[in-house]
Amino acid sequence: MKKMRTKMIVALLVIALVPVFPVYYVVRYFLQSSLEVGYNRDVGEALESAAGVTRELYGTYRQQVLESVMRIAELPITASVVTNGTLDERQRAELRLGQNQRLTILDNTGAIAGQIQMSDAIAFPQIFENQTRPLRNEEKAGFIDGPKDRAFIVAFSPIESPLWRQGTAVLTSKVDDDFMQRSEAIIKVNQIFKTLDFIEDDLSRIFVLPFVVIYLPIAGLSVALGVYFSRRITRPIESLSEGTKRIAEGNWRYRVEKKTSDEIGQLVDAFNHMVSTIKEKQDQVISLEKMAAWREIARILAHEIKNPLTPIQLTVQQLRDKYAGTDPEYRKLLEECTEIITDEIETLRTLVREFSEFARMPKLSLEPGNLNELLEEIGKLYARDNIHLYLSETLPDFSFDHEKMRRVVINLVENGLDSIREKGAGEISLKTEVSGERIRLLYSDTGNGMPVEIQDKIFEPYFSTKKSGMGLGMAVVKRVVDEHGGRIWFESESGAGTRFFVELPQTLAPQPPVKNPEEKE
């Protein structure tokens, strides 16, 4: 079975590993196709162009803020704010600030001389909290890159008079939220694209490792399952193989143990049933062969013994009748010898009759009847013996040979009574019941039982444990049951008694013909 087990393991392993290669190449193809769809040159150029446009727009907006602060720094209003520190509504309108802008005017010391914020809803960054130094005279208009948030652009421009620098105008402008969100999204996608484009080859290589890590346990599991299932399948087959060897060696009692209820279990049941059937048929054939041989022996013995019995008996009687002497002692001896020889001749005649009956048992004479009535009849014959009847009330009539079945039951009862007498006490039970489509007679006694070593010979002709008898009784019992199409078996335990089971086919008894009421009897 090792070869079969190995083949099953290899088959499962091949089944598990064969899909690896096509699946690997298909998945890798789809991965590369997906990467090519998302990371091709057109998409990269489009993203780069979009990012460039975004940067240009942002630079344009910064330039506009710078130009606005330079314009504001040149206005006389701005210089007056540095000098006077006040800014009325007319001056505010003249500065033309946007809703998202804040103007801060610093003097030469860097202190805030004035501040205008068009919207209170915007939290402008405080970029001058730690800056107290004034801008140097050489510093021209430009940008302050203090805040990390690109949403705010801070530009400055010096406020100059014809003679000196009076201060600095600082304009903080908030970029449009929608523009910032879109531009950041474009920049982020472009960065991701460049990163993935850079690691595209690494992704393909990284894909192989998880693929192998996943399939290696699958291959190991396939081998484990192959070992498990192969053992479950091959072990019962090994048991069947072992059973076949045992049966071939002649051990017909061997049976394969059933461990599962699946198809293998059904195969084991079929094997055991086949062995039982073959054994039963073999026993029947052997029994028939033995019976035929013994019948031929019985026929020859009956013929050879019967022929000389009558001449012997006549000769002895003539010797006795022709003696004319007067010696009383000799006459007495002659009478006794003649009587002994006559008795022994009658014994031989009885033996010849048994041989003849066994050698040529007549055909069955099947007639409708009820087995209960037969047992009741036999029970009356043995009324003084301890025999109990347990008769089924639903037992149907069926066809059987009344005289032969009577002989079967009497043989069983006589053997049981002999066993009980040897033991000193006991009882016999006769029971009838219906078992499916068959009639069953159950005999049991509490006698000595039979030793195990003689149980296989109990139905053989001329085998007997009694000192008297020819040993044909149980052979006749089995033959009668077999001729009825039934079967007989027994259970016996030495010192505890014996039980016989007789099953007969439940053939329907023929119904009597219906008479015409006009006919005379």
Image: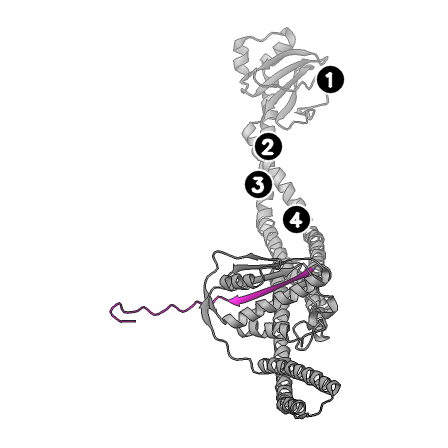
Q: What amino acid type is highlighted by mark number 2?
A: Tyr
Circle 1 residue: 131
User: Magenta region: which residues?
Assistant: 497-521
Of mark 1 and mark 4, the one earlier in the sequence is: 1
Q: Where is residue 482 in the image (x, y as percent from the top left)?
A: 56, 73
Which-is-in-front pick, marks 4 and 3? Answer: 4
Marked residue nearer the N-terminal end (4 or 3): 3
The answer to which of 87 and 328 lies nearer the viewer is 328
Q: Distance between the residues labelled 4 and 3?
A: 18 Å
| Residue at figure coordinates x 65%, y 48% from the top left | 197
State the SS at label 3.
helix
Which of disc 2 and disc 3 is earlier in sequence?
3
Amino acid type, label 3 = Ala
The picture places residue 71, in percent across and down from the top left corner, at: 58, 21
Q: Which of marks 4 and 2 is nearer the N terminus?
A: 2
- In depth, the one of 505 and 227 nearer the eye is 505
Gap between marks 3 and 1 measured at Cα: 37 Å
Residue 219 appears in which quarter of the rendering?
bottom right
Q: Mark 4 points at which residue?
A: 197
Label 4: which secondary element? helix
Give neighbour class at mark 3: few <14, some 14-19, many 20+ (Cα, 10 Å): some
- Please say whether residue 509 is visible from this viewpoint: yes
Q: Nearer the viewer, residue 415 or 461?
A: 415
Alpha carbons under labels 2 and 1: distance apart:
26 Å
Of the residues under marks 3 and 1, which one precedes in the sequence?
Answer: 3
Q: How crowded is mark 1: few (under 14 residues within 10 Å), some or many (20 or more)?
A: few
